[in-house]
Amino acid sequence: MSYDVTSASDGSDLPAGAPPRVGLLGTGPWARRTHAPALAAHAGSTFAGIWGRRPEAAAELAGEYGVTVYEDPDALFADCDVVAFALPPDVQAPLAVRAAAAGCHLLLDKPVATDVEQARAVAEAAARHQVASLVFLTLRFAQPTARWVEEQAARDGWFTASAHWLGAVFPPDGAPSAYADSPWRKEKGGLWDVGPHALSVLIPVLGDVVRVTAARGPSDVVQLALLHTSGAASTATLSLGAPAAAAGVGLELRGAAGVHGLPDWSDVPGAYGRALDALLTSARTGVPDPRDAAFGARLTEILAEAESQVWA
């Protein structure tokens, strides 16, 4: 199970001497808490406008930041150099293909799609139209976690790793989170919402996944057992339905270099700004970022295989 897209951009469609214009698709809690404030604060680009599936929400959010509200996503694509996505994955994917065809660089959310063919189509569109792409995977851009991942990836001799991401979005006790109204999260659970985060750390450190075994636990818990190209084995326990007192995130690596644990992180809007920096660098240099749409498609392949086992 593998997929490889060589994506490239010559950067020729970025404006010379003017900040690139960034448009936002989406108006939900994630867009309000992370995307919009990060785009408004970004010094190297111009926050140009917003489109949403709920026009009244798009108008409200656009008004908060003094940007244009678009009634049609294609009109936003025509006015922008970069499109940032804060949409459900299977709404995001076809719009990303259209945005790439319009010449827009893609700042995608995870997962790129929950359907393998849709995820591949996004990666193929980015490559075909020579636009840069990047998937916002929080741990790969937040600090100090991003630096920690690079440090561990430079080490050899890893033996095993264990990860857990237990969210209380739909807790059996207490109030649900602000993301509990998300239909796709209710349907797909932690495997698809937080699984990309765990894989985004395990793969660059231990290598691509060559075998995945998945088992279902209580609530939406899914446990993954992974074998990597390095020969190391890892596990990941994923859920959005953990009791509030049991919620938390952790990842531990064990090998010849000892035991190394993922550090805490904060400032998610700042991490999103660094993701936009990385995308713009890729667009200007023509060098694909390792966290691009092709990597996003690979994550979808792995998660789809796991899903086929637990819901077979």
Image: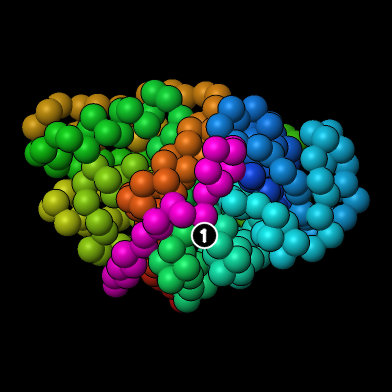
Q: Residue 186 lies in what quarter of the image?
A: bottom right
Whole-percent x, y for residue 170 in the image? 66, 45
Q: Residue 145 lies in what quarter of the image?
A: top left
Residue 154 placement, left or right of 171 = left
Whole-percent x, y for residue 293 in the image? 44, 59
Q: Which residue is mark 1?
A: 112
Whole-percent x, y for residue 266 in the image? 52, 24
Residue type at mark 1? Val
Q: How is the image coloured?
A: rainbow
Closest to the observer, 213 or 130: 130
Residue 163 placement, left or right of 59 = left
Instruction: Tell me the residue at 67%/59% (across/down).
Output: 77
User: Which span is picked out in magenta?
Assistant: 1-20
Membership of 12 in magenta stretch: yes
Instruction: Tell me the residue at 59%/51% (across/down).
Output: 81
Q: Where, quadrant-wise, is the N terminus in this rendering? A: bottom left
Residue 195 placement, left or right of 104 = left
- Asked whether the viewer can see residue 66, the reply is yes
Whole-percent x, y for residue 126 in the image? 46, 64
